[in-house]
Amino acid sequence: MSNPLCFTATGEGPPLVLLHGFTGDASTLRSLSHALADRFTVYSVDLPGHGRTGHLSDIGLYDFLATVDLLADFFEERNLNAAAVLGYSMGGRLALALSLNYPHLVSQLTLIGASAGLASQSERLARRQADSSLADELLEDGLPAFVDRWMTQPLFASQQGLAADVLAAARQQRLANDPVGLAASLRGAGTGAQPSLWGRLSEISASTLLLVGEQDTKFRRLAMRLSTGLSQSETVVIAQAGHAVHVENPQATVAALREFLSTNHD
């Protein structure tokens, strides 16, 4: 059976794989793929339940570790060994797990607004229950109502200053997703559904860049915590940005990425 993950590829050079966040798709990282295609072959993946990959009939593939295995299979099908990998938010959690479980596939790791999960079982249980309720709301209230609530949560408050056409395009992109797929993703790959990776950070052999927006208070704390556990990491705080630095300040994000990625590829 061929790998069900859809993707776009652009550019020439060593591989760089981009993993989007929840409700996103490959297009949401386009500012990065376009800017880096002069030096890399950039693969932008649509994760299970999102974009052109859509809803997968095998519900087991939404499980967090099953998705990590699916990504590893995607890499191996294309002979993408020792690739640079970037993940945003949910994509960052998956990228972190990929680098732990399949270290030969990841040479450089970039995490944007990401975490290593929740440390305690009680925290994970509470989050799983909250995500399950969110998934129920999505299916009961419909995708438009869910997306409008999602985009106005405090985590994305800094995005309200973006141009109206940028916000409208982001809303339309989210509305193009399959609601059943998004609900399955919440239940299977939400933060509460994943195992805690905090105790394994020292195992990561890939050099790691932590990108976080200066206005993203929660994830600045998490980046500091990640940096203490990682053996080879640097943290760059992106000015005038919140959680989605690649959307809110793409120029500074690309500059930080270029500097980091050039370390091992020049």
Image: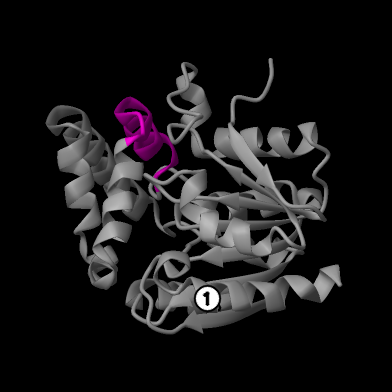
**Residue 201 located left or right of residue 88:** right
Indicate the position of residue 233 as horizontal and vertical percent values: 66, 76
Residue type at tag 1: Gln
- Numbered marks: total: 1
Magenta stretch, overall SS: helix
Q: Quadrant of the N terminus?
A: top right
User: Above or below — where is 191 with respect to 141?
Assistant: below
User: Above or below — where is 189 with respect to 237?
Assistant: above
Which segment is the magenta one?
176-190
Indicate the position of residue 123 as horizontal and vertical percent values: 33, 55
Q: Quadrant of the C terminus?
A: bottom right
Q: Nearer the viewer, residue 195 or 97?
A: 97
Q: Nearer the viewer, residue 158 or 109?
A: 158
Q: Which residue is mark 1?
A: 251
Indicate the position of residue 147 as horizontal and vertical percent values: 23, 45
User: Above or below — where is 264 with respect to 114?
Assistant: below
**Which residue is at a point 39% across and 51% down the rendered structure image?**
121
Q: Nearer the viewer, residue 35 or 58?
A: 35
Considering every residue shown, the one lying at the far front of the view is 165
Considering every residue shown, the one lying at the far right of the view is 266
**Residue 179 located left or right of residue 222:** left
Callout 1: SS? helix
**Which residue is at a point 61% across and 78% down the rendered structure image?**
255
Indicate the position of residue 192 as horizontal and vertical percent values: 38, 47
**Residue 135 located left or right of residue 82:** left
Can residue 231 be seen from the camera position used here? no
Q: What colour-coding does the image apply?
A: one colour
Can residue 243 be seen from the camera position used here? yes
**Which residue is at a point 61% across and 56% down the rendered structure image?**
33
Magenta-drawn stretch contains 33: no
Q: Residues within 10 Å of mark 1 (few under 14, many from 20)?
A: some
Q: Nearer the viewer, residue 109 or 64?
A: 109
